[in-house]
Every structure is written in structure tokens, then in C-alpha cells.
Amino acid sequence: MPANRFNGFSDYGVGIGLRVPHYDHIFAEKPVVDWFEIISENYMVDGGRALKVLDQILERYRVVQHGVSMYFGSTQPADREHLKRLKTLTRRTKTPWLSDHLCWGSVDGRYTHDLLPMPYTFEAVKATAARIREVQDFLEIPIAVENVSSYAEFHESQMTEWEFLNEVVEAADCGILLDVNNIYVSSQNHGFNPFDYVNSVPAERVAQIHIAGHSKFEKYILDTHDHPVLDSVWHLYARAIERVGPTATLLEWDDNIPSFDEVHSEALKATQYLTPTEVLIPSNSAVQESAREVVHS
Amino acid sequence: MNLLELQRRMAEDVMRPLTPDFQMQLATSNGRSTHELASSYIKPNDRLSSFDRLEIYNRQYWFRVIGAVSEDFPAVGAVLGAKKFDSMVLAYLRENPSTSFTLRNLGSKLPKWLESHPEFSPRRHALLLDVARLEWAYVEAFDGADLAPLTAADFGDLGAASPLFLQPHLQLLDLRYPVDELVLAVHRQTAPSDIMSNAVTERKQAKRTRLPAMRRSQIHLAVHRYENSVYYRRIDPEAYRLLFALQSGNLLGQALEAAFSGSSLSAEEQAAKIQECFAHAAELGWFCKPHEI
């Protein structure tokens, strides 16, 4: 796999999330998995089984850390205790890069524990980029920011989401964790063409890609991570790989988690897009057609 | 509206309690329309109003935090029943919103908070308190620090004026009911899960568990971790007082005095108890070297 400075010049292929229901299978069967992504917060504890399991995993597998509570877009100062615990964990895992979300979730010391959308303003670009730089300097490893699924847009916004992402990563000089499922979910919720998003991302900054399943409700789509990847998302993924090149890819499956083999098999479907000779990339028009089918079904 | 103002506005709206049927409230406590509030900063689209879009986040917030507390206190939920448990968690979180980056600490104040809130189970309040205390002790024991245990040589150096440190994961409880049986019965039916993920949270109802009958009968428990599993160990009152005094920072001599203050045991019986307590505690690695800061 091609490497860049935003993923620590690593060569990671297709990975899956390390989840509690799969622990026994992994230790008993020792399956071949290119890498595991962990949710950092689940291992930022003082002791116990989580750290023991992590150490056992690290003996055999490569691990990348993904966070859910750094809230780069929050206006409140970074939590030093959080940063210290995170740095301790990065030294344990030796993660080549670290990702978290381009969102906010806390204000005035109170935490919502949600990935809340940003207003796409120049003020937010400046504040968010400053926070990313601060975290990157403290942790001393490359940071990749992930685009989130969103269900609301703000009157205050001065640009599109992808323009905001591009402004932030340029100003922070950081990488991107491109979540093509999130792009798809937001495109359906906000009525934009997901291809415009994928086509606008600075390819040289993409450190990693996320794929996942989602749930469709009558009037909106939720990012539930409880299904296989839908065709529309695979189409977007194919287009992303066409632009970015083969890139570390991870399947997220966080709820109604099936067997390890089922999750891993679903993730490995990505390899057909990562091997250029076997790629069958659908045309833009085919993807847009499938996107419209979902919107109007 | 600048970034800070928008985040304050949205956080207040997202964290506002839901209606009893888990919808967003139509008005704030000041009587202001939430439709108007949402429209002031959130765009509608052709399918959803500003209110509808904000409501997605409002519901997600409550489903997530209620879910997190429910996972740590399944036996409290089993004692109260789903409806009362939801009301209790809502009331608790209204007064104790999360102030930590991790959901792990969300329920930390629940046992103390429940002491002054008997209204959720007036007839079984004491039982409920014991269950809550044991369930939080489980959380602390599950992932508390495990420091280097004392060696035989370390024990040889101890005297009455020595401090003696206990493992941070060791929790000591003085309970009015034998709730260890009840909590174990519920926990056996609760699947372990990760603390946090980045997917949206769906509302889930716990299965109803058949609970063992409880009669008031004081017990003392040591909740501890051994080889990464959490155990509840019943200990006698003297051992509890001794360990509790040590945990509270007393020197060894003071702790021994506290353990047998007013005791009717003979000197030989006391010596036997001390030996037994130390032998068990040392075997399980409960005594440790002080935490280096």
C-alpha cells in the first residue's frame, strides 16, 4: 500500500475494529488480520482486562488508534488529563497515526458524548486547526481527522462541508480519515452529490478510509454501523480509491455485531478495489443513480 | 452567533430532558418554543424541520447516556424495573451531567446521589442503595490500577508505625443486604461491551431478570480483581474494619486498634483473625507498594 506522512509512511491494508464479542475467537483461532483499529477511550484505563487483552493483541497484530472524544472543534481548552492518557496509550500501541473526528461535543466542561456537526465558518476553521496542531504537537504522531455523519446544518455556515474539511486540514497540516459511509449518509441527509465531496478531497492527505453500514429511516439516514456496507457506499469507496490510491481501509461494525468471520469477510470485500487489475469501478452516473434510488425509495 | 455561542446553544438544547415518550420537548423551562429555538440556528430541509433535525441529536444524547448508566447498573435496573429506572437515570443525569471525556465515569456519583433520593423505591431504598454501591464497586474493581504487590521481605519490615497500602482496585463495602447474590444473578445475564463507540445509539430495553429474595442481613464485601476477573469476597467485620482503616490512611497499629475496638474476642482469637486476614490479603496481592506520582 502507498504510504504518506499522514499515516506514518505505513503500508496497512484492510483492517477491522477490535471489539469485545470477538476477543475469544481472536485468541483461540489467531486469524490473519492485517490490522485492528481500537477505540482509544476503551483502553485509557488504569488496569484490568482491557489492557491485558490489548497487550496480547499487540504481540501478534498491528493496531491503530481511533478516538471519539477529542472534539477538535470544541471551543473549550483541550483536557490535559485526556491528552496525557492518550499519549501513554500511543506509546503502548505504537500506533503509526491517530485519528479522531472533525466535530465538537463538549462546552463549558460538559460533555455530550456525541459527534456534533461543525458550523462551516472561517472562525471554526481557525479554532479547529489550532486545536489539531496542539494535539499533534503534544502527541508527536500524525493526526488524521474524520468527517462525521450529520443530521443538521447551520445558518451560520459559509462553505460546504468538504470545503471546510479542506480548509481545516490545510491550516492544521494534518491528514484525513475519509469515511465514505459518512459522506454518503450526510449526502442523503443534506441533498448533495457525494461524488462532489470525494472528488474535492486533497488525495495526498488521505491517511485512512472508513467503510460501514447505515440504517435508512423514512426521512433521514442514521450512521448505525450495524449492517454490511451498502452498494452505494462501495461505489463511493471505489471512486475514493481511484483518486487516492490503495489506502489503509477499515470496516466499522459497532452494533448487532455478527461473528468475527462475517465482519472480516465483509471488510475483505474492499481488497477487490485495492487491487488495480481487479477493480471494476462504476461510472459516476451509475453511482449517482444508486444514490437517487436510496433518496427516493 | 459565534462558535462558542452556537455550541452553548446547541449543547443546552441537546441535553434538555425528553418527554416521557422520548420526544423533544415543545418548550423550554422558560416557556420558549423549541421550534423557534431550533429554527434560529439550524436549517430545515425538504423532509425535516429544524426541530426534527435537532430532535435527532436530543434523542441520541439521552439514549447514549441512559445506555451508559444502564450498562453499569443492570441490577439497579432489575430492582426498579425499566420505567422507574429510566426516570431515576434521567433525574440523576439532570443533576450530574458528564464532565469527563469518557463515559466510564458517568455513574460514579449515582450511589451517593441515590442516598438523598428515596422516591424511586421508597420501600426498598436501603436495598437499592446497596445494589448501586456494589455495582459501582464492580466498575472500579474492573479497571482500577493494579500495583506491584508486597513481597515476603516487605512484610518483614512492617511495624505498628508502618503505613500499608491496598490495591486501588480493591473496594470494601459494608452492606445491609446480601446483595452479592442478586447482583451476580443479574450480571450473569449481561453481555460485556465496549465503553464507547462512534456509532449512533439505539434505545434498548433490558431483559427482565428473576431476582433472588432478599432479607436484611449485614455483610461485608471485598470487591477485587484477580487475574483480570472481578470477585466478591465476603469478609468478617474485623477484617473489614482493619482493611478499611488501612485504606483510609491509618498506620498499621492504628488500623489494628480500629479493627478490634470494643471486640469481645480474646487476645488469641484476635491474633488468629489478624493472621487469617493478612494471609488471605497477601495471597490475593491486596497489599501493594505506594503509587509513584
Image (tube, rainbow, N blue to C red):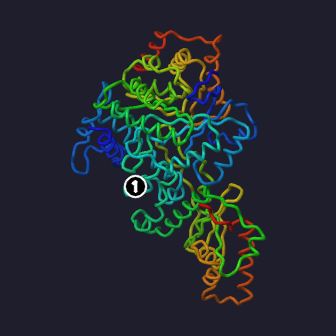
Give coordinates of residue B168: x percent, y percent: 61, 63
Give coordinates of residue A53: x percent, y percent: 68, 46
Give coordinates of residue A174: x percent, y percent: 50, 30
Q: Tell me, yes or no, if residue A248 can be seen here.
A: yes
Q: Amino acid at mark 1?
A: Ser
Residue found 38% across the figure and 46% down from its top = A76
Quarter that holds the N terminus of chain A:
top right
Residue found 59% across the figure and 11% down from its top = A280
Give coordinates of residue B84: x percent, y percent: 42, 56
Furthest-right residue in view?
B152
Q: Tell me, yes or no, if residue B62 can be seen here.
A: no
Residue A293 location, quadrant: top left
Residue at which label 1 appears? B87
User: Does residue B31 sit above or below A156 in this rendering?
Assistant: below
Q: Is residue B203 left or right of residue B219?
A: left
Residue B75 location, quadrant: bottom right
- Crowd tier of the residue under label 1, counting other residues whose Cα lies within 10 Å: few below 14, some 14–19, many 20 or above: some
Give the chain letter at badge 1: B
User: Does residue B234 sit above or below A64 in this rendering?
Assistant: below
Residue found 55% across the figure and 41% down from its top = A139
Residue found 60% across the figure and 30% down from its top = A8
